[in-house]
Image (cartoon, rainbow, N blue to C red):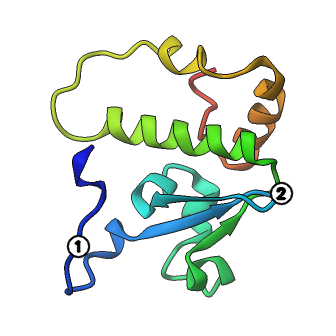
Amino acid sequence: MSNDVQMNDSGGEKQDDWVKITSSDGYSFLVKRSVAAISGTLKNMLSEDSSFREAIANTCPISERAAVVEKVCEYMSFKAYHDGPGSKEGVDVNEFTERIPPEVALELLLAADYLEGVLNSSI
């Protein structure tokens, strides 16, 4: 994942833009727009066809605490990497689920439901 940071003056494509996801307790997480688009809710919030405040500001607030938002961002990155082009070895879902602390599991499931499909098929 060495191409996460690109520096050029052309502005780049919208697909490579970074978006900020904020938690209810004030923490911010930067992810690529293509990674955030894994969530149906975030994809709709960030749609260029909409006039949503989130699309204009490239910032999506999620009403969950930072520990939950961090795991959501981590999973979206994990899924984007392993579903992306190129040959990847099969990855067991347990590789990700073992990193979920039990104290955030229920909140994470609720956040996944809100974010439409982020974690639904893996837990």
Q: Residue at x 57, y 23 (%)?
A: 122
Secondary structure of the residue carrying tag 2 is loop
Q: Nearer the viewer, residue 31 or 87?
A: 31
The residue that mark 2 highlights is: 25
Number of other residues with Cα within 10 Å of mark 1, as a class: few under 14, some 14 to 19, many 20 or more: few
Q: Is residue 71 above or below residue 104?
A: below
Q: Is residue 47 above or below residue 51?
A: above
Q: Residue at x 34, y 38 (%)?
A: 81
Tell me the amino acid under the disc marked 1: Met
Of label 2 and label 1, which has the lower sequence position?
1
Q: Is residue 27 above or below residue 74?
A: below
Q: Quadrant of the N terminus?
A: top left
- Judge left or right: residue 68 versus residue 19: right
Q: Residue at x 34, y 67 (%)?
A: 15
- Judge left or right: residue 47 versus residue 1: right
Secondary structure of the residue carrying tag 1 is loop
Q: Residue at x 73, y 40 (%)?
A: 68
Q: Nearer the viewer, residue 29 or 62?
A: 29
Query: Residue 78 lies in what quarter of the image?
Result: top left
- Looking at the picture, how far across and down is residue 121, in whole percent? 58, 26
Q: CA distance from mark 2 to mark 1?
A: 31 Å
Tell me the amino acid under the disc marked 2: Asp
The residue that mark 1 highlights is: 7
- Looking at the picture, how far across and down is residue 40, in whole percent? 58, 54
- Looking at the picture, how far across and down is residue 11, in whole percent? 27, 84
Q: Quadrant of the C terminus?
A: top right
